[in-house]
Amino acid sequence: MNNCYLITNQRIIIANKTKDKIIKYKELNEIDEINAEMSGRFFGNIIFGEPEGVFGRSDEPFSLFNRSGMSFKEDEYAFLSVENINEIIPVFEELGLKVTKTFY
């Protein structure tokens, strides 16, 4: 897409490159955890907060087989299809954020 991702010492920003417009941002002090989902070639997604699973939580209204419901909600704050995640993760760690890495 035409988005670019920016990291400052106060917030993360998702902006549109062609329109020079900020789409959304999140303050770093609002981020409890960062999840990096990546391939062995260090390409993947960085999710700020808990990732949304395909199966929702058990406390959601719709239930499938009395376990958890289906979730079609996308992660609200995420850097998608990022190359060289291994170069970006140290930036978050230097800012004092906890990063969980998952390889697929």
Image (cartoon, rainbow, N blue to C red):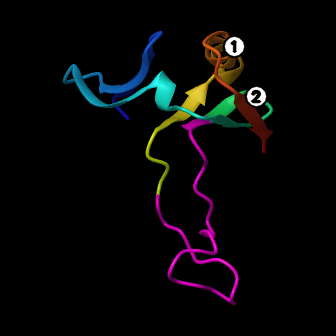
- First in sequence: mark 1 vs mark 2: 2
Highlighted range, magenta: 45-73
Amino acid residing under circle 2: Arg
Total labels: the figure holds 2
Quarter that holds the C terminus: top right
Q: Is residue 13 above or below residue 55?
A: above
- Is 71 contained in the magenta span? yes
Question: What x and y, as percent, mark residue 82?
Answer: 57, 29
Q: CA distance from mark 1 to mark 2?
A: 17 Å
Whether label 1 touches label 2, CB < 8 Å:
no
Q: Nearer the viewer, residue 25 or 84?
A: 25
Q: Is residue 28 above or below residue 32?
A: above
Label of residue 14 in the image: none
Asked which quadrant contains residue 92, the reply is top right
How crowded pointer 1 is (Cα within 10 Å; few <14, some 14-19, many 20+) is rated as few
Q: Is residue 33 above or below residue 4?
A: below
Q: Residue at x 62, y 12 (%)?
A: 91
Q: Is residue 15 above or below residue 58?
A: above
Instruction: Mark 1 vs mark 2: give the one in front.
Output: 1
Quarter that holds the N terminus: top left
Query: Label 2 belongs to which residue?
Result: 41
Q: Secondary structure at mark 1?
A: helix
Q: Residue at x 46, y 61 (%)?
A: 73
Question: What x and y, as percent, mark residue 71?
Answer: 53, 68
Query: Label 1 belongs to which residue?
Result: 90
Question: What x and y, as percent, mark residue 95?
Answer: 60, 12
Q: Secondary structure at mark 2?
A: loop
Main SS of the magenta segment?
Answer: loop
Q: Residue at x 67, y 13 (%)?
A: 87
Q: Residue at x 68, y 16 (%)?
A: 93
